[in-house]
Amino acid sequence: MITDEENNKIIEENIRKSKEIINEAFKKFDNDQLAITWTGGKDSTLTLWLIKQVCDENNIKIPKVMTIDEGDSFPEIHEIIEKYTKEWKLDVKWMINKDVIKAAGGKLGADVEVNKLNKRNSEELIRLGFTGERFPFEAESWIGNHLMKTVMFNMFVEKYQIKGMFMGIRWDEQAARQNDEYFVKREGDSYTPEHIRIQPILHFKERDVWNTTLKYKIPYCKLYKRGYRSLGASSTTIKKSEIPAWEQDLENTPEREGRRQDKEAAMERLRKLGYM
Amino acid sequence: MKNVVLITIDALRRDAIGIYSKKNSLTPFIDSLRNKSIIFKNAQATGPYTQSSFQGILASSYYLEYGKEKNISSKKILISEVLKRNGITTAGFHSNAYLSYYFGYNRGWDHFYDSMQEEVSDMYPFIRGDAINLKVNYWLSNYVRQKNYNPFFLWVHYMDVHEPYIGEEKYIKLIDSNINIGKEKMFELFKEVILKRDISNCDNVELLKKLYESKVMETDNHIKELFDIFEKNKILEESIFIISSDHGDEFAEHGGLSHDGKMYSELISVPLLIVNWDQNKMINCEQLVSLIDLAPTIAYSYGLKTPEELKGQPLLPLDNYNKNNCYGEAMGKIGNKEKDTDKPVYYYREEDFKIIFKEDGNLWEMYNLKDDPGEKKNIINNSASKRLLKDKLIPMINRWIK
């Protein structure tokens, strides 16, 4: 067992490291070239809180905050974002792919006719290699995820000429993250504007996130208390437990299990390999 | 009783391993295990791609046994299920969509990681070996920390050798210091040459082969890392390691690339080693063996009889193994995409003779692998033993007819 004293040491050391990365980012970029990705989930809220700490300590304005509404989010997520937008006096920009939502008649699962989409969205579909006439409106499907999230992210970076995006990615969250660095350059192409992703909480384990959140009374979405471990789209995220996330066996069960969509995930892999 | 660790490497050709090849070795680590290994010189897969071959490896059954479904039939039994029923802890780690939860491969594992919930990029459309090793390390370190842990069965599958062959510079330079292309270009080769099965330009094919070889070197290092994890946890000597692949890969030997529904040796011949730290000499086994026999061999290692659902028989003890033939089947797809119109293809091999039947076009082929290892000369019309081999294959082909 880890003692409270050791635990405190881990928390403080993690915070110190994160603040160092955040300070480095403020040295590298002007304030208006920076932005913070905020989903209302535990990781991005911790990231935002850490940035706010650094800003308050140094009397700096908190950079713009970007949040994406993928058309299928939990009301509890909206609640926390709206509450702290006010309380922390944040400049939050909501990104919504209205064109796709309109084409789906605002209904989840409804068919979206490709010829009803605007130029940008149709071009993005061609880029994905999608050649069908319609697709169902789902936020976490292959196409849905791209149009509702990736395209919106890119448009935000483009519109506000952002050079550095703060993101709440962690090494232990997904194996694919294991080689990530604190500053990652995203090369630009005709669709993705070049930018640097700044990931100040890479070294936090899931357990550390909760220890820090609870110790410093950092706000968290109430769904975590009801058993959710990881929050994705509302209609495809399930809770695997009834007890608060931080009381679950975080070390031996997968964090994103409740977000698993077996078929879609397997199909996407096969598509990438040209099998579909 | 020892732990059994099954290490499979997707799309690894037999001749890419130093032990099996006369060329400069790409696999110094695997080669270094030779003096503790039984080396099966003549092992054959039950099919030329993952869906067909893994039903042989993990369920000791043939692909089309219960129809043409890609998922593993509920009538089949996975080795993980056999072992779990017998109180052995089972854990599997891989990143191949065809072996995922969705296709039913999660059955029987106490711990199953298929990586499908991870985000992956287009260039690396699977979790790479180093990340797989981290997952294994995490599980293994926690598992052996228990006071009196029971023997376990661990399966680790690496995807790194599989296309799109995006190589790392340090390995590519070791293969050919003149190659100077970026990852974007490699990815373009995947899309323009591999996916289109375009072998018209020999230079491209040769370049792809070298990129493939660089991935083999990379994977050899991942396997070394895995052994290091065992050493660190002090269980190297308490474990038996089986190293193999599900199929090979083609570089224009029979007019194609990658691994389509064909039954030639570049796809069907696979490496197979059983590594045991108690064994202090190299044992070569020249006999023809099939991966259908792996699951029974694993069961045997835990002292279990072969359950009757499994089609194979244990390779161990070697002296008791008396088969001299093997069989495989798949859908004869050409290109990465499968089509509804694809028809089955079958092979049967007995000693040096192999017979192949393609339902599409009703084509028979036969090769004498001793004189013609490249399978270029079809002797179906002038072989005395063709009737003998045909008779073995026809019941398998006709089992569809009710």
Image: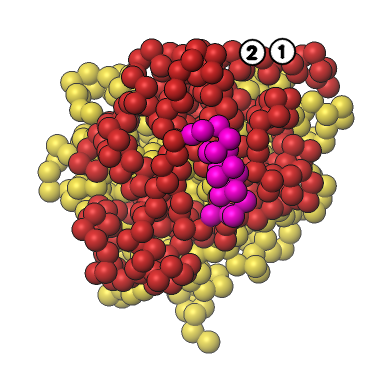
Is residue B235 positioned above or below A153 on the image?
A: above
Q: Position of residue B247 (x, y in %)?
A: 43, 48
Q: Position of residue A241 (x, y in %)?
A: 75, 50
Is residue B52 positioned above or below B282 on the image?
A: below
Q: Secondary structure at mark 2?
A: helix
Chain letter for the red colouring in the rendering: A
According to the picture, the residue beneath numbered tag 1 turns out to be A9
The residues tagged by marks 1 and 2 sit, at their Cα atoms, a distance apart of: 6 Å
- What is the number of the mark on residue A74? none
Q: Residue at x 72, y 19 (%)?
A: B234
The quadrant holding residue A142 is: bottom left
* Colour of chain B in the image: yellow
For the question of whether residue B346 can be seen, the reply is no
For the question of whether residue B97 can be seen, the reply is yes
Residue bounds of the magenta highlight: A73-90
Q: Amino acid at mark 1?
A: Lys
**Residues at discs 1 and 2 in contact (Cβ within 8 Å):** yes
Residue that extends furthest to the left in the rendered view of this protein: B201
Q: Amino acid at mark 2?
A: Glu
Front residue of this view, candidates B157 and A237: A237
According to the picture, the residue beneath numbered tag 2 turns out to be A13
